[in-house]
Amino acid sequence: MPGLSIRMSHSPGLISLIVFACVFGGALVGMRFSALLPREHLDDTSKDVVRGGMAVVATMVALVLGLLIAGAKSYFDVQSNEITQLAADVVLLDRAFAHFGPDAAPLRAMLKGDVVHIADVMWSPSGSNEPPREVQARSAEPLFDATEKLAAKTDEQRTIKAQVLSLMVELGRLRWLMYAQRQSRLPAALLVALIVWLTLVSLSSGLFARTNPTVVGAYFASALSVASAVWLILEMYSPYTGFIRVSDAAVRAALAQLGS
């Protein structure tokens, strides 16, 4: 349903803090309720039943968290591989222009400027979600038009020109693919369900725990670990703007080769 999703770029730190507060708060509430419940509600039989039911919930939580982390890591790796592919194709395009001859020298300069602009846009705080149409309007499309107007005088130049145009189309397709992938959203229902499950597990555990600094510290560490896992998931879905970023080393290395 529309609206029932969370943009990955929406403050991973804030969402992780909410997860931490719910999980740690659930444990504290459970320990508080433990003092208010009748003793027969806290006997060994009740404890076994509650722990058995929560074991099922904890298993579901572990499975969902594992799947989310694996999916986020796969998404991050795909983005990294596409950046490497983009850099390799740009260098190949530059070498093709070089083999075309001196007439392609202005196009090589245009290509280098375009790559600099694209890199600045992709790794800027607000530019990672800029549609490639906006980028191409200032860079790739003028370069494509200029390449089409390039006069090929020999069979070799005609072959190179055809290859260059084909490679530029592939680069455009890759840019649109990367943009489409950056629109990935985390279903809000899944995140809410995960938080509820985690809170139930910590609350039920707190019902049968003694209130002392060691127990509170253990619950604090557990909540922090779960919140960190959620933070990692959201950060890997924001590979160009978060703390965990796709390296721009491949693009910078390609820039060093352009025009040489």
Image (cartoon, grey):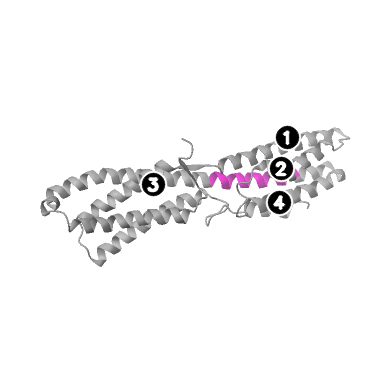
Marks 1 and 3, how far apart at CA:
42 Å
Q: Which residues are magenta?
A: 77-93
| Residue type at tag 3 | Leu
**N-term mark: 1 or 3:** 3
Residue on which the image places disc 1: 166
The residue tagged with tag 4: helix, strand or loop? helix
The mark lying in front, picked from 1 and 2, is 2
In the rendered image, the vertical position of residue 90 relative to residue 244, given as above or below: above
Nearer to the camera, 166 or 44: 44
Q: Tell whether position 35 is magenta.
A: no
**N-term mark: 4 or 2:** 4
Marks 3 and 4, how far apart at CA:
37 Å
Residue 139 in sight: no
| Residue type at tag 1 | Ser
| Residue type at tag 4 | His
On the picture, is 250 further left or further right than 100? left
Furthest residue toward bottom = 213
Q: Which mark is residue 117?
A: 4
| Residue at the image position 34 percent from the left and 54 percent from the top | 22
**N-term mark: 3 or 4:** 3
Residue 194 in sight: yes
The mark lying in front, picked from 1 and 3, is 3
